[in-house]
């Protein structure tokens, strides 16, 4: 995993937004989504080795700011991320993020990276990973309800990983749907713009909800969800923010990333504390069943978890080998004599 860096051990490679975009185009968006799906799957298979905790959240009336830490005993990572739905009206992103990897043995950072783009990629890859185990076989039609910043990534991940070829789009804001349809026009996906959520889900085997409003919303009602579909619920990711009517959860089998976090933030916050859920890693590691029948309704109640960020950062660090898609930052004070930090300051005069 080591990068070819200058001998000064205190320099930390930093991947800016510009360099992250260069890296994505160097690898290819769809190949990168496939790679991320596989890297996340590999880390989910070793889920028990991770030191896990629900993310630390600071909520306000305007949104939420969170820290998402995790470690596998050798590498530690955290992500700083916000969620501010009102930002859109100001022309700002609703979600921004940055991430860090550090060696557990020394505590020294080994990577700092933008994670606004990377979070969109890893979220889509995680959705595709869940659908790999939970969606109907040979599913090739997906509805996306909510056509904001996540929509295109979700569509491309499902295409690259599952072979989905038809996407049906709906958003309460027609401009968002027009944007998503335009961006997907040259991707080989058959895109249909739909006048309502009900029309978007017609014939869809996978239904993805990824709306941004921080409220207890009902994007999908029970009568809209037929037998055999897989629901990929991405938008409900904080207390007081949901997208599905609770009756859907009463007849669906619900799968989550990390139950202690999802019970606070996910769709299942609407349910009793003993509402049964299955953590996705147990399905991936063959300890639990995923899809059991063609008529089963499966729900991936995705709120995003720190292991996914760990996987994405680890993948980026390895992908930087042999490239110039990073800058070296002098952000760690590292005197020749570890006891003489003040002397280092004096010599700087």
Image (tube, rainbow, N blue to C red):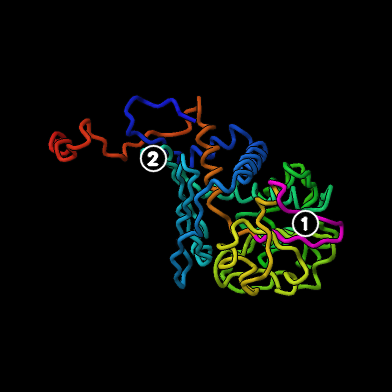
Q: Nearer the viewer, residue 92 or 275?
A: 275
Q: Is residue 184 left or right of residue 81?
A: right
- Dominant SS of magenta comes to loop
In the depicted structure, whether residue 159 falls above or below residue 233: above
In the depicted structure, whether residue 161 falls above or below residue 303: above
Residue at the spot 78% in from the left edge and 47% down from the top edge: 164
- Circle 2 crowding by C-alpha within 10 Å: few under 14, some 14–19, many from 20: many
Image mark for residue 206: 1
- Give the labeled residue for mark 2: 109
User: Could you tell me residue 346's position as x and y percent?
Assistant: 12, 37
Which dot, 1 or 2, sits closer to the camera?
A: 2
Residue at the spot 70% in from the left edge and 74% down from the top edge: 246
Q: Total marks drawn?
A: 2
In the depicted structure, whether residue 146 falls above or below residue 347: below
Cα separation between marks 1 and 2? 40 Å
- Circle 1 crowding by C-alpha within 10 Å: few under 14, some 14–19, many from 20: many
Mark 1 touching mark 2, by CB under 8 A?
A: no
Magenta-highlighted residues: 285-301
Asked if residue 184 can be seen in this view, the reply is no
User: Could you tell me residue 55's position as x and y percent?
Assistant: 49, 59
Q: Is residue 15 left or right of residue 269?
A: left
User: Could you tell me residue 324's position as x and y percent?
Assistant: 47, 28
User: Could you tell me residue 45's position as x and y percent?
Assistant: 64, 44
Residue at the spot 72% in from the left edge and 41% down from the top edge: 160
Residue at the spot 45% in from the left edge and 28% down from the top edge: 3
Q: Nearer the viewer, residue 269 or 218?
A: 269
Is label 1 in a helix, a strand or a loop? Answer: strand
Q: Does the magenta-highlighted stretch encompass residue 296?
A: yes
Asked if residue 320 can be seen in this view, the reply is yes
N-terminal-most mark, 1 or 2 = 2
Q: Does the magenta-highlighted stretch encompass residue 291?
A: yes
């Amino acid at each position: 995993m080591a990068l070819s860096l200058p001998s000064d051990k205190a320099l930390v490679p930093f991947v800016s937004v510009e360099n992250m975009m260069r890296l994505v185009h160097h690898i290819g968006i769809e190949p990168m989504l496939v790679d991320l799906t596989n890297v996340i799957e590999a880390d989910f298979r070793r889920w028990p080795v991770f030191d896990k905790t629900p993310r630390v959240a600071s909520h306000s009336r305007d949104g939420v700011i969170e820290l998402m830490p995790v470690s596998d005993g050798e590498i530690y990572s955290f992500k700083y991320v916000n969620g501010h739905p009102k930002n859109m009206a100001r022309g700002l992103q609703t979600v921004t993020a940055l991430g860090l990897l550090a060696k557990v043995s020394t505590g020294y950072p080994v990577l700092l990276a933008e994670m606004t783009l990377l979070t969109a990629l890893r979220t889509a890859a995680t959705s595709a990973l869940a659908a790999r185990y939970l969606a109907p076989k040979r599913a090739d039609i997906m509805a996306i309800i909510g056509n904001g910043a996540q929509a295109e990534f979700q569509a491309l991940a499902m295409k690259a990983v599952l072979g989905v070829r038809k996407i049906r789009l709906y958003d309460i804001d027609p401009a968002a749907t027009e944007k998503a349809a335009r961006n997907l026009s040259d991707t080989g996906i058959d895109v249909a713009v739909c006048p309502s959520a009900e029309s978007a889900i017609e014939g869809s085997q996978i239904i993805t909800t990824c709306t941004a409003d921080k409220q207890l919303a009902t994007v999908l009602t029970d009568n809209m969800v037929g037998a055999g579909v897989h629901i990929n619920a991405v938008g409900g990711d904080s207390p007081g923010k949901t997208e599905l009517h609770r009756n859907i959860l009463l007849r669906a089998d619900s799968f989550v990333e990390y139950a202690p976090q999802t019970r606070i933030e996910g769709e299942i916050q609407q349910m009793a504390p003993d509402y049964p859920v299955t953590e996705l890693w147990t399905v991936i590691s063959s300890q639990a069943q995923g899809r059991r029948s063609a008529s089963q309704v499966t729900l991936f109640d995705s709120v995003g978890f720190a292991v996914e960020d760990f996987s994405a950062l680890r993948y980026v660090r390895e992908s930087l080998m042999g490239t110039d898609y990073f800058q070296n930052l002098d952000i760690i004070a590292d005197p020749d004599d570890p006891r003489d930090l003040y002397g280092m300051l004096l010599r700087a005069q």
